[in-house]
Image: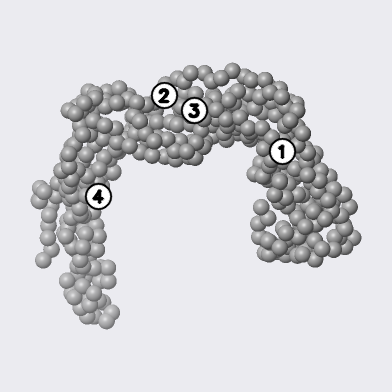
Amino acid sequence: MDRDLSDDDSVMDLSFEAESPLVPPAELLERLPSCDWLLQGDRCQIFFPPSEAPGRPQEQRCWSSFLEHRVPVVTEEVAREALLSFVDSKCCYGSAAAGDLVILELKQQALRRYRLETFSESRISEWTFQPFTNHSVDGPQRGTSPRLWDIKVQVPPMFQEDTRKFQVPHSSLVKECHKCHGHGRYKCSSCHGAGTVRCPSCSGAKRKARPARRCQMCSGSGRQRCSTCSGRGNKTCATCKGEKKLLHFLQLVIVWKNSLFEFVSEHQLDCPGELLAKARGETLFKDENTMVYPIVDFPLREICLASQRGIAEHSATLASRARVLQQRQTIELIPLTEVRYWYRGKTYVYYIYGTDRRVYVVDDPERCCCGCAIL
């Protein structure tokens, strides 16, 4: 027999009610005088970090020792070995050309790459909730909630990004579930509380027209058990998991981010910049502190300008929304060699870049068409 739960006051018909936002009802916020300073805004609030004391002043540096690094010479033998190692790792490239090619010219350049890393911490608060399971409640009656930047947490290793969430002390309150209004369940939207739905085989007619016989799927009843609610006519509230109440609390979200600024000095060779940005280099200079200052006296002016630009960009981006924990700037030497070679009457080019001598092939004469990646 079909059940009709339309008159059952213990089940809320929320079939077409949209999911409620994370912000608790307005009357709930009025009971948190200790957290009023946290509740300026909508769902979440960004908190500006306390200002830090300025770092150390600019130091004079002697760059002569940094410029004594000489680029390792790439000979024809080294160039050929680098190409053979490359083609051995790629299914699309033939090794015959690498062994038989005639190297015509080697062009070497020493590039400088400037890199600035800024490791910062930002904090926001947001309302969230979870089903209340009758455990103890850390509410405002236990004290005043601390300001977000006063909450002590373990900082991850420098320059390693992470995101963590913490419950703000003394911010918890219990309220009946705003989805099911404290009933723990609501009427099934598929069967509207009946527990059964119209038979999909006979469309509720109980019989099949051709041949004329009783519908076997529903045994002639014209109805089938609702698969959505397993015939119960109602579903457990997904918001409170049937607990009828929710524990609302402020959640502190801390994001540790490593912002990166990179610049590679100009060169006349046609090697893609994205490869050089990722290339392994030899460190000529490293400066790490809570705050680093722009490099102003490096012999290559473009590196000085890049340092000034990078530090200014990070300062403008992060100053109003994050606390800078550590900065690191480096200058690296990136060797780059253009190899022009002759093979079967044509001239080709490939590049050797980085201290680990990676290869970028512009056009391999024996490459097949399966298209494996070369980066």
The residues tagged by marks 1 and 3 sit, at their Cα atoms, a distance apart of 27 Å
> What residue is disc 2 on?
48
Circle nearer the N terminus (4, 3): 4
Q: Amino acid at mark 4?
A: Ala
Q: Is residue 29 visible?
A: yes
Frontmost of labels 4 and 1 is 1
Under mark 3, the amino acid is: Val
Amino acid tagged 2: Phe
- Pointer 3 residue: 324
Question: Viewer-nearest of labels 4 and 2?
Answer: 2
Whole-angstrom CA distance, mark 4 to mark 3, is 40 Å
Q: Which mark is residue 39?
A: none
* Residue 166, quarter of the rendered image: top left
Q: Nearer the viewer, residue 191 or 220?
A: 191
Residue named by callout 1: 333
Residue 117 position within the rendered picture, expressed as x and y whole percent measured from the top left: 57, 33
Residue 66 falls in image quadrant: top right
**Near-viewer residue (266 or 194):** 266
Residue 113 found in image quarter: top right
> Where's the N terminus, which quadrant?
bottom left
The residue at which mark 4 appears reads as 238
Q: Secondary structure at mark 2?
A: loop
Task: Identify the residue shown where x is 56% and y is 19%.
Answer: 56
Q: CA distance from mark 2 to mark 1?
A: 38 Å
- Which residue is depicted at the point 38% across and 39% down? 164
Residues under numbered marks 1 and 3 in contact, where contact means CB atoms less than 8 Å apart: no
Relative to 130, 308 lies left or right: right
Residue that extends furthest to the front in the rendered view of this protein = 65
Seen in the image, is 341 located left or right of residue 216? Answer: right
Q: How far apart are labels 4 and 1 at the CA level? A: 57 Å
User: Disc 2 or 1, which lies upstream in sequence?
Assistant: 2
Q: Is residue 170 above or below residue 192?
A: above
